[in-house]
Image: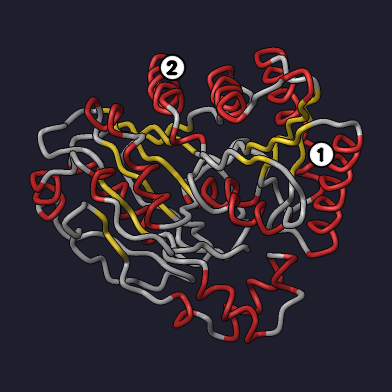
Amino acid sequence: MRPRRFPFPILGAVVLGVGLASIQAQEDHGAHRAHGYQGHDMPMPPPDELGRRRMGMDMRDMLSEDVIAGLKEKIALYGLLTDNELRINVAQMGENYTWYVSDADVRDEIGVLVLSHGVSEAGDRIMTDSMRAIAGEFPTAIGYGMAMMTSSHLQAAIDDLEAAGAATIVLVQTTSTVHNSMTRQWEYILGRRDESSYLTVKPIETGAKLVFAPHMDDHPLIAEILSDHALEISTDPDNEALFLVAHGPEDDFDNELDLPVIESLAEQVKAATGISEVRAINLQDDAIPPVREGNVRQLKRWMQQAQRKGKKLIVVSPASSADGLQHHIRQDLIGLDYTFNEKGLSQHPNFTEWVVITVQQTISG
């Protein structure tokens, strides 16, 4: 797995609106259940001043010989690493934690749990800020992290939502489609699948009804975000080539199912922007090196071909978060002359609108 990065200072302006009332509400929620690999209990700390429950565990401390063997068996990329390399990779990934977004006076029989990979301090704050609208209507929490070795943070989020009155919890996944291992791990933990895609952590315990909302897929609101991001850097659509560069799943079978979705987005963007050439590709950012490197070579070939035609190169990404994949894209394309709008989907008002509409449709459906 590609590591999460935490290079940014705290951006206070992004988190205005997280009140002390919401923090106190969580402190009153009582003891929380904790779940880790093979049912190992983890401490459940109180929230910090922003509403985040950081699990207080260093993932490296969980890397016993059995855990390392399990990760190597489940994750192809890890199977190629030495034990020490795997430990280093896990140490760089960042933590799993939950962020309770709603204020204390927001209570309802419907709750919302947003599931997000998490990328960095700044990126997670922007993602959280995009949930303010839904958090003002329904009790809302975000579970950050891949849940590879623990479900503690997701259990804490569920407990907080139940304490706010939620009897039904809508699960909103910020992965673009269902075709990826992280979605399958979340679905296992939340009772939709019988088998984990990473380690077999303890499933969630809850009396609430859990309802999965649809993924973003090629929703018109998402296509409009990408179109706007492209037009922000476009100067001459007739003489430009736009490349939609997505994270993509690590498995080739998943990738074959995922690609038509991003290609549909590319078609919508081309129609909306008038940019003469629009192409889409999945980097398969967590795949084994030969697979990922092959995708990078393909992307570079496309860009060089367009450049030889005299076209200006522009790049946008359908990554939901504001930081993470963008860093990898910059590294991959060093040496090429192109313009990159590095914004994530969560930085656009349409993302908030998509969340609200998706939750409302899931409830009514």
Residue that mark 1 sits on:
256
- Residue sitting nearer the eye, 332 or 3: 332
| Residue ID at (47%, 79%) | 62
User: Where, by quadrant of the figure, is residue 277 drawn?
Assistant: top right
| Residue ID at (60%, 30%) | 233
Residue type indicated by callout 2: Gln
Mark carried by residue 361: 2
In primary-sequence order, the first of circles 1 and 2 is 1
Query: For the residue carrying disc 1, how many other residues have a C-alpha within 10 Å: few (<14), some (14-19), or many (20+)?
Result: few
> In x, y percent, where is residue 344?
51, 39
> In x, y percent, where is residue 220?
58, 17
- Whether residue 262 sits left or right of residue 109 in the image: it is right
| Residue ID at (18%, 39%) | 17
> In x, y percent, where is residue 339?
66, 40
Query: Is residue 160 shown above or below 134?
Result: below
Residue type indicated by callout 1: Glu
> Dot 1: what SS?
helix
For discs 1 and 2, the disc positioned in front in the rendered view: 1
| Residue ID at (71%, 29%) | 261
- Residue sitting nearer the eye, 286 or 199: 286
